[in-house]
Image (spheres, helix red, strand yellow):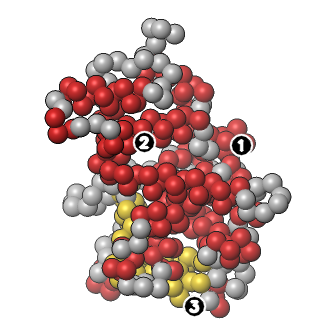
Amino acid sequence: AGGASQHSEAYHWMLQSRGSDRFKLAEFLPAEPALERLMEVLGRSCNVTFRALPSRSWLQTGWHGGVRCFEVVDGPPVGLAASEGRCLGYVYVELYMSWKGTRPLAPGALLLAPGHVHLGLNLQAPSMGATKLLTPDDAVMMAHELGHAVHMLCFKGSSQQFYDLPLDVLELPSTFAEVLATQPQVVGEYARHHASEGLPPDNLIQVAQQGPHFFMQKLQTWNVGLGLQSDFDALDATPSELQDYALKLWQQFSLVPASSSFSPLGDDAGGCLALGANHVAYMLCYLRSALLLKTSGKASPNAKRWLSPDFAGSLR
């Protein structure tokens, strides 16, 4: 064990989390069908319905052909209930990166104006004639951004008032959607084989769940970000001192010694440091989302209850 490195640790956790199975699960996550099924799952958990609008030319909409438009209606996607609800607004989904390369690489939701949300998911487009398959992480990212869209359309104030909300309020609905999408009981609601449309086997569904390695990585990155922001004097530090201290903080939540050449700041910890103390808000959102799912009634947690109108009504 003394000769192991963080590379050995990564390999160990890949085996423990059955990392190769995550790629097998991608066979059950064709991009466009998975998007619509995730919309239905999120709609059932929030009492809204996404309705695809007919494709139109850019002369009619101002959007290029790669943008899909959806009307969002207040009401669960069950029977005729959704058709009786009021229109909350429209979501413009851009699945793939623009070929012009003018958009940011990171996915994001943008409230263009009250009732109008653009989702730039920035996935790599498939080759001509091929089917785009999502990794479980892609599907979770998609759920996160759809959560933002629902929040933006349900918000009753102006765009400026929305973006003035505290970060933990801004991120809670999207983080809840993300955590919901990782629950094994829910994965089976949106995962279907790209060819046969069959359900994934139970052993594959389990790999979508956020396991110990996910939370260990969160602890490592949050500890680096918080530690450098709080008890480290960066103004008087040299680059090597910054590197050494970041590595020390990362090491506190690692089971094996890290190589001196490894820099946590080159990974997610660098993003946490750039966010400053704001990433504490994300930590609170993960905890709050887990609490919402685990305390949503006296019975054991299950998708049937999470996707019910009663639960959705209390969530709203």
Which corner quadrant of the image does residue 234 belong to? top left
As drawn, 218 above or below 164: above
Q: Residue 115 appears at what percent x and percent y? A: 43, 84
The answer to which of marks 1 and 3 sits earlier in the sequence is: 3
Residue 245: x and y in percent read: 30, 28
The amino acid type, in three-letter code, at marker 3 is Arg
Regarding mark 3 in the picture, which secondary structure is present there?
A: loop
Q: At 81% across and 54% down in the image, what residue appears?
A: 300
Q: Residue drawn at (51%, 21%), measured in percent from left and top?
A: 255
Alpha carbon separation for disc pair 2 and 3:
41 Å
Q: How many numbered callouts?
A: 3
In the image, is 316 to the left or to the right of 131? right
Residue with the mark numbered 3: 86
Q: CA distance from mark 1 to mark 3?
A: 38 Å
The reply to whether residue 131 is visible in this rendering is no
Q: CA distance from mark 1 to mark 2?
A: 34 Å
**Front: mark 1 or 3:** 3
Tell me: 70 left or right of 199.
left
Q: Give me the disc on residue 201.
A: 1
Front-lying residue, 56 or 16: 16
- Pick whichever, 123 or 252, lies toward us: 252
Name the front one of labels 1 and 2. Answer: 2
Q: Is residue 128 above or below residue 249?
A: below
Above or below — where is 257 with respect to 291?
A: above
Q: Secondary structure at mark 2?
A: helix
Residue 222's label in the rendered image is 2
Dots 1, 3 in contact, CB < 8 A: no
Determine if residue 273 is in view: yes
- Kind of residue indicated by mark 1: Pro
Q: Amino acid at mark 2?
A: Trp
Label 1 SS: loop
